[in-house]
Image (tube, coloured by chain):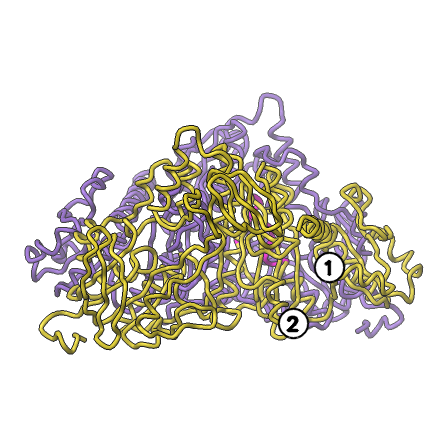
Chain colours: A yellow, B purple
Amino acid sequence: MPHPNRSNRSARTVIVGGVAGGMSAATRLRRLDESREIVVVERSGAVSFANCGLPYHVSGDIAERDALELQTPERLAERFRIDARVRTEAVAVDAAAKTVTVRNLDDGRTEQLAYDELVLSPGAAPRRPAADPGAPLFALRTLDDLDRIIERLGQPGGTGPAVVAGGGYIGVEMADALHRRGIAVTLVQRGTSLLGLDPEMSAPVADHLAGVGIDLRLGRAVARVGTDHVLLDDGERLPAGLVIAAMGVVPETALAASAGLKLGPAGGILVDDRHRTSDPSIFAIGDAAEKAHAAGGSRLVTLAGLANRHGRQVADVIAGRRVHVAPALGTAIVDAAGLTVASLGLGETQARAEGRAVRIVHAHPLSHAGYFPGARPMSLKLVIDADDDRILGAQAVGTDGVDTRIDVIATAAGAGVTASGLADVELAYAPQYGSAKDPVNMLGYIAGNLADGEDRTVQWHELDGEIARGAVLLDVRAEGQLAEGTIPGAEWIPVERLRERHAEFAGRPVIVHCRVGQGAHTAARLLTELGHDVRNLDGGYLSWRDGRRATELAGEARRAA
Amino acid sequence: MPHPNRSNRSARTVIVGGVAGGMSAATRLRRLDESREIVVVERSGAVSFANCGLPYHVSGDIAERDALELQTPERLAERFRIDARVRTEAVAVDAAAKTVTVRNLDDGRTEQLAYDELVLSPGAAPRRPAADPGAPLFALRTLDDLDRIIERLGQPGGTGPAVVAGGGYIGVEMADALHRRGIAVTLVQRGTSLLGLDPEMSAPVADHLAGVGIDLRLGRAVARVGTDHVLLDDGERLPAGLVIAAMGVVPETALAASAGLKLGPAGGILVDDRHRTSDPSIFAIGDAAEKAHAAGGSRLVTLAGLANRHGRQVADVIAGRRVHVAPALGTAIVDAAGLTVASLGLGETQARAEGRAVRIVHAHPLSHAGYFPGARPMSLKLVIDADDDRILGAQAVGTDGVDTRIDVIATAAGAGVTASGLADVELAYAPQYGSAKDPVNMLGYIAGNLADGEDRTVQWHELDGEIARGAVLLDVRAEGQLAEGTIPGAEWIPVERLRERHAEFAGRPVIVHCRVGQGAHTAARLLTELGHDVRNLDGGYLSWRDGRRATELAGEARRAA
């Protein structure tokens, strides 16, 4: 539909932001409509760069900076007839007049661009700690940011030690990247968990990072960045010639505000199920826009995959096509110095903070059949809505096979498969790839047993309380497994001896545990059949050990504070 | 419910077959019911062995034979109070009397076992070619079979060359295993495709196997096995000191016949949606039982994962629990001498043979983001029901990431996600693990474009006919891509030149192609917008090249025959 005031020319769509979401929108829109005028304005010096790849040029994995530039304005013009303008900032929107004011950052000149549809994909801005003038503080959002960091790294004599403020995805990637360049790195994380994980899932990751040589400050925050040091909130002063701000992001909403658009509860641009803002001619996608979330509500989910998908969808909407916008799960993955960490949805901590009734499942399976060489351990966690058995979240830490399992769980959760329904997922099995009972199926079996009331569990953080209330804790592992460690107060009776010895704890509530929860399930079923009141320690000794370690880490953080 | 004639004792379940399905049933049933008597009879010398691991002891990957024995009768008795009897064959069932006659294979003595429920999990028997007495012909089904092969391999002077009859999963695994032991191997396959793949997906696998040094005879069958050679049906005589029968399996139904049970259309034991046979006290699972198939009908699907799952379910049914038996997809995976090959559901060949209207999608994505080092190519194929957009089948060939993609597609298909719906699957993305637009999402986008009529495609095997009918074939690749090869008769016009040159082929139907189909999609959209009648060559040059190679292989097979 041409603009009412400009019916003598073709329709024009202006897209603000030329990376994941904006560029997907632009190219898709061109494929759907050859006649439309498409203008993309991008504040940085490049369009369509691989923002998720930036840390890997710092590390050296991606040797050539050019590999990160996926498109150029010239190629976009030639192939897609897109008018892509870099170093051009959209500074204001007049929604009534349907114009956007853009400023050329090189010559400072401004221009008014009329639009029929405006797509806002400006992204989100990194949070920055307070800093002295001249402090070597860098964020990592654009190729320009990357160039500044690389320049700093290349200065004569090097940078000296680095501090990374923030233990989220970018923080961990950058800490690893700098460390692998041979730079002494301290990672400062306000909370005691990394990467948005629950504490017992985070503890092994923290220990792994410390193990490779990254210094950690958990439960601490950067108070101020000086020219040659960082001051933490507990008064510690860390020498630093390079500081990375990776403390999360804030959606870029200034332009939306200038257009009078409504914001959502999480502070992002509010959109409907067609990516339309409160102004019918303006759409918003990417990190600046809130997403309908699979766990309910409207949330910020700053992921490239969603930005790309929603960019394509917004083009479909503009071209008059039907779209289905699936609620966001927030599926994410990161290489944490050789460990793979992945998650989706809500963690247990977050779900409980939201007042949700949840069931929790931990498992510690192998990446493939144990009888085939090379199987690697992983830890999986499922957060389940206790009311309807829905998968609210999942967390996974390991190496091989973590990506496959989180992708399968994400696919199932997105399709509405319940936690118990994971038992029915039919995955490919050969012994070097998986197991006849895949880890995902095992999660489904455990979840189903809980949902049916066949199995009852206690979590690692509930154990002390249960013992204090009189429960007897039975360690039902085989003798050869005890050397790995024991839980204080546990009595050892292997599964095979329970039938003859179960009268010893008659009348007392029983908690059974094994290494990972599976043998103890057999024990729990047996004791239930024999008339006992039994619960299984979810995730077994391994989850308890990880939980205890998390408690230690939190304690160290408190003592330091 | 106790047996009417034996109300003075606990109920007894007899399970015939003690490997995947039978053993899952036995242990689950014990967990659900401590009082029940559970008897497992197994004809071979071991229960609960890793049958999918057998080829990998031949190859040496699994060094210790003991690693393949997952349980012993002693451990099953101690932990689960299961009466597991090896070298014991069930020879007849009296369904009216509810007794099964079992014979001890060591002393030949028989016994009548009364049952309340009988679970048949006898598996399937390998098909064997005709053989002379004393011919070194071996199947690979049990540890006993494995021991015989290992003994043969260990004989003084070795075995000489080996012939593997059959190019399915076991055949390819065994050919690779023997080849890696340093034995000259010829793989004989009746059809011209391997592993149940469609021809263009199989051709690269055949070339890969030949490339590592496995001799192939496609379109040929073993006519007879002699004591020192194999005779093929075209008269060729191959010297052979070891011959593996891997020509598929026949469900073991003798016992079912003795019980008067109904068989299904595919020749397996017919069961209902609770694994119950035509006799209400007799259940059947595993390779002997037919499965309700996701693509419709009742079929044989001989996979360990399904046997395990159905074993667990049959225990639930016997214990009075509700179960949901999901239709089988037939998700399978194999390491073909370093290539990963995976599939589910129906291939195009099979679907068309069944008279189904299908849409086909080929893609050739990278295992992860191309800008991150180490991305590996793969080929994906989707077979889609043209009526309802259902995923009927998928095939995948590559290395890294093939397992993840087939598992995601299997999860989606099992959950009822349509082919177009794969666009919405939210997978974990970081550049070393995947792509912001994952290969699975790309399949969904392509499928959606086809379903919407936005894109029309031709298949590699339809191209010659279309050109003969007057279509012009345009190669829209960039100049640098032409060195990979060209399709005879194609005219080269890169996407970027189409706007200025499209009048050259006005009035003629156009087929566009690029390397994999993506650039040609942009070209097809552009030409459609410019008023042309356009189709895209699905899968681009790469699928056409693989299809041409498949045609060559079939031609060689015909000439030899």
Mark 1 residue crowding within 10 angstroms, few (<14) / some (14–19) / many (20+): some
Amino acid type indicated by mark 1: His
Residue B191 in sight in this render: no
Tell which of A510 and A81 is nearer to you.
A81
Residue tagged by mark 1? A461
Q: Quick check: A534 left or right of B552?
A: right
Amino acid type indicated by mark 2: Ala
Mark 2 residue crowding within 10 angstroms, few (<14) / some (14–19) / many (20+): few
How would you classify the magenta stretch by its main secondary structure?
A: loop
Tell which of A174 and B9 is nearer to you.
A174
Quick one: which residue is furthest to the right in this view? A504
Q: Which residues are magenta?
A: A428-442
Q: What label does residue A357 carry, if any?
A: 2
Which circle's residue, 2 or 1, is located before the other in the chain? 2
Distance (Cα) linking label 2 and label 1: 16 Å
**Percent position (x, y) of residue A437?**
62, 54
Quadrant of the snapshot with the C terminus of chain B: top left
Labels 2 and 1 in the same subunit: yes
Tell which of A163 and A16 is nearer to you.
A163
Residue in the image at 12% along x and 51% along y = B497
**Percent position (x, y) of residue A210?**
61, 40
Q: Quick check: B323 left or right of A272?
A: right
Quadrant of the snapshot with the N terminus of chain B: bottom right
Tell which of B141 and B540 is nearer to you.
B540
Q: Is residue B380 magenta?
A: no
**Percent position (x, y) of residue A347?**
59, 61
Quick one: which residue is furthest to the front in this view? A133
